[in-house]
Image (tube, grey):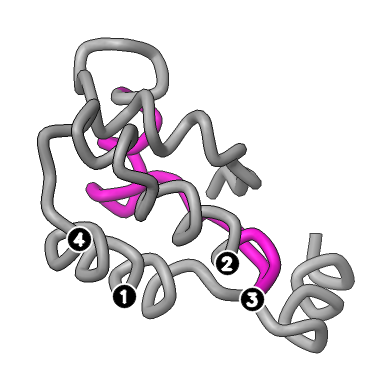
Amino acid sequence: MLRAVLDTNVFVSGLKNRKTPPGQILQLWRKNKLIVITSPQLLAEIHEVFMRPSILSYLNQTPAIMDEFIKLLIRTTFVTAQEFIEVLNNS
């Protein structure tokens, strides 16, 4: 299965419009056809960006909805250093 590390901008753009390439990438992830790899630092950056008033307004979302999205990312994308090493060794 394809694995990818996505930039914060891909998440913002993909949530804004599902028909764009970033939106299509997020759809593949949601359908379990793509493994998204993150780190604690990337998750913190995504959270910080999503909580900006300008981004909340741009996405027409509330902090609570964006918190739920972050929780989904944490549950489905975080890879520990050991897991990452195992992925590299099995590739």
Q: Is residue 43 left or right of residue 28?
A: right
Q: Amino acid at mark 2?
A: Ala
Residue drawn at the location 35% of the way across and 66% of the way down: 70
Q: Which residue is mark 1?
A: 71
Location of the C terminus by quadrant is: bottom right
Q: Amino acid at mark 1?
A: Lys
Q: Check if residue 41 falls in the magenta segment.
A: yes
Residue drawn at the location 47% of the way across and 47% of the way down: 49
First reached walking from the N terminus: tag 1 or tag 3: 1
Question: How far is mark 1 from mark 3, CA to CA?
Answer: 14 Å
First reached walking from the N terminus: tag 4 or tag 3: 4
Label number found at residue 79: 3
First reached walking from the N terminus: tag 2 or tag 3: 2
Label number found at residue 44: 2
SS for dot 2: helix
- Depth check: 29 or 42 in front? 42
Front tag of 2 and 3: 2
SS for dot 1: helix
Q: Are marks 2 and 3 in contact (CB under 8 Å)?
A: no
First reached walking from the N terminus: tag 2 or tag 4: 2
